[in-house]
Image: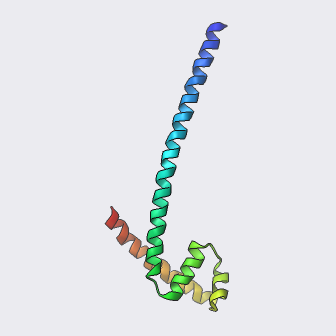
Amino acid sequence: MARYSVYRALSKEKNTKKQEDIISRLGLQTAEINIDDKLLLEIITELSNKLPEKCRLVFQYNKLQDRSLADVAEQLNISQKTAEGHLTKALKVIRANMGDMMTFFL
């Protein structure tokens, strides 16, 4: 009985160490992800600032501030289809430039 109690204690200690290692790795990965996310958001914001005014506003309100396209169109006094067109144009420009920026960073 004593032998099995020792086995259980050693097993429990081993599992605790594994869990601590996993938690410490996740903490490091989370910090790296946060830095990457901030850098990516900064790049996207910089690229969106180069867009024409209406495209920039529609993109920033819709994608960066999570507002619906209908709300954005109403606030800017444009039709929803026009807002969709501006958003489509903005996304095309940003995607094209993101490819260039990613090539530059890599």
In the image, 17: left or right of 42?
A: right
Residue at point 35%, 71% (across, down): 100
Quarter of the image that includes the C terminus: bottom left
Q: Position of residue 69 (x, y in %)?
A: 63, 80
Report the number of discs: 0
- Establish if 14 lies above or below 62: above
Q: Position of residue 51 (x, y in %)?
A: 46, 83
Q: Position of residue 105 (x, y in %)?
A: 34, 64
- Establish if 93 lies above or below 16: below
Q: Nearer the viewer, residue 15 or 28?
A: 28
- Establish if 49 lies above or below 10: below
Quarter of the image that includes the N terminus: top right
Residue at point 45%, 63% (across, down): 39
- Establish if 36 lies above or below 9: below
Q: Position of residue 16 (x, y in %)?
A: 58, 29
In the image, 84: left or right of 40?
A: right
By what rule are the colours in the image chosen? rainbow
Residue at point 32%, 67% (across, down): 104
Residue at point 64%, 13% (across, down): 5
